[in-house]
Structures are given as C-alpha cells and as structure tokens.
Image (spheres, rainbow, N blue to C red):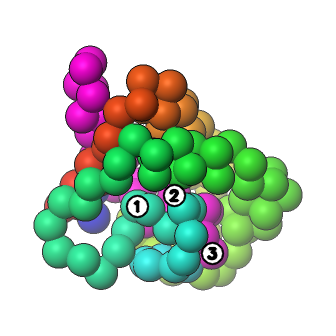
C-alpha cells in the first residue's frame, strides 16, 4: 500500500510515503490499521481520500512530535511490524529501520508545515 499526504492550503504540496505508509502508521499507533486519537490518521478502513481540517492537522502534528522515541524504537523491533507490508515476515534490517524513521520524520515535518500554514491536509492511499 502506498500513501500520500497533500497540503490543501495557500501553497499546495505533497509528501509521498511510498510503501512505508503501513509501517509508519504502526510506529505511531502500534496497530496496522485504524486506532484512535490523532496519531491514527494514516491508515483507516475508510475508502477514498480523507481530509483533515487545519485544526485537526495541527493536533496531528502535535501528537506526532510528542510520541516518545522509546515507544517508536520498541515498535521498530517488534515481530508485528516485521509481519506488515512491505516486509511480510522478514526481519527488518538496519536500513529498513532507518528508512521508516526517515519517512516518519518527513511526515512530522510535513504535518508541522501544514499546521503552521493553518492548511487542511488530505490522506490518499492506493
């Protein structure tokens, strides 16, 4: 599954998560899909694009920035993450972990940029 976050404000922009979307969602929530609260914004059972208001984008940015590093690190080493696409049961190499962390940092920066512009965002999965 691939994902894209699009900023809908005065300066439209997009951030492609490529096929890291499920892994990044897991790092944020501890589950492959769904969840509750602002960290559960990437992968949902809903069909079609989902749009978040500027206020919701700001709450997401705050939540992503505040997740504790030790929580993310523990999830990086979990068997549950290794079972998700694109890893499909293989043990994550250090390069895989660095890639997921880099995408997570990109999501964090992108959401903070949208929040600072008071821009709405749209999540599209394919």
Left or right of residue 77, residue 45 in this image? left
Determine the secondary structure under disc 2.
Answer: helix
Q: Residues within 10 Å of mark 1 (few under 14, many from 20)?
A: many
Q: Is residue 20 visible?
A: yes
Say which label, 1 or 3, has the lower sequence index: 3
Screen quadrant of the C terminus:
bottom left
Instruction: Residue under label 2, please give it.
Output: 24
| Placement of 8 over or under 73, stated as above or below | above
Q: Closer to the camera: disc 1 or disc 3?
A: 1
Q: Residues within 10 Å of mark 3 (few under 14, many from 20)?
A: many
- Residue with the most extreme right position: 70
Q: Nearer the viewer, residue 73 or 52?
A: 52
Give yes or no for contact between labels 1 and 2 (Cβ–Cβ under 8 Å): yes
Residue 101 rendering spot, x and y as whole percentages? 61, 45
| Placement of 124 over or under 121, stated as above or below | below
The magenta span reads: 4-30
How many numbered marks does the figure carry?
A: 3
Say which label, 2 or 3, has the lower sequence index: 2
Instruction: Residue under label 3, please give it.
Output: 30
Q: Which mark is residue 42?
A: 1
Q: Is residue 95 visible?
A: no
Determine the secondary structure under disc 1.
Answer: loop
| Placement of 61 over or under 30, stated as above or below | above
Q: Residues within 10 Å of mark 2 (few under 14, many from 20)?
A: many
- The residue at 53%/32% (across/down) is 112
Determine the secondary structure under disc 3.
Answer: loop
How far apart are the two marked residues, 1 and 3, measured between alpha carbons?
12 Å
How far apart are the two marked residues, 1 and 2, measured between alpha carbons?
8 Å
- The residue at 61%/62% (across/down) is 27
- Residue with the most extreme top position: 11
């Amino acid at each position: 599954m691939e994902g894209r976050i699009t900023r809908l404000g005065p300066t439209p922009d997009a951030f492609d998560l490529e096929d890291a979307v499920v892994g990044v969602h897991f790092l944020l929530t501890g589950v492959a899909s769904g969840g509750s609260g602002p960290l559960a914004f990437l992968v949902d059972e809903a069909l079609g694009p989902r749009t978040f208001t500027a206020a919701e984008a700001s709450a997401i940015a705050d939540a992503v920035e505040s997740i504790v590093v030790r929580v993310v690190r523990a999830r990086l080493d979990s068997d549950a993450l290794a079972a998700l696409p694109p890893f499909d049961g293989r043990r994550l190499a250090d390069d895989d972990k660095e890639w997921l962390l880099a995408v997570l940092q990109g999501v964090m920066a992108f959401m903070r940029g949208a929040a600072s512009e008071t821009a709405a965002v749209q999540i599209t999965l394919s």
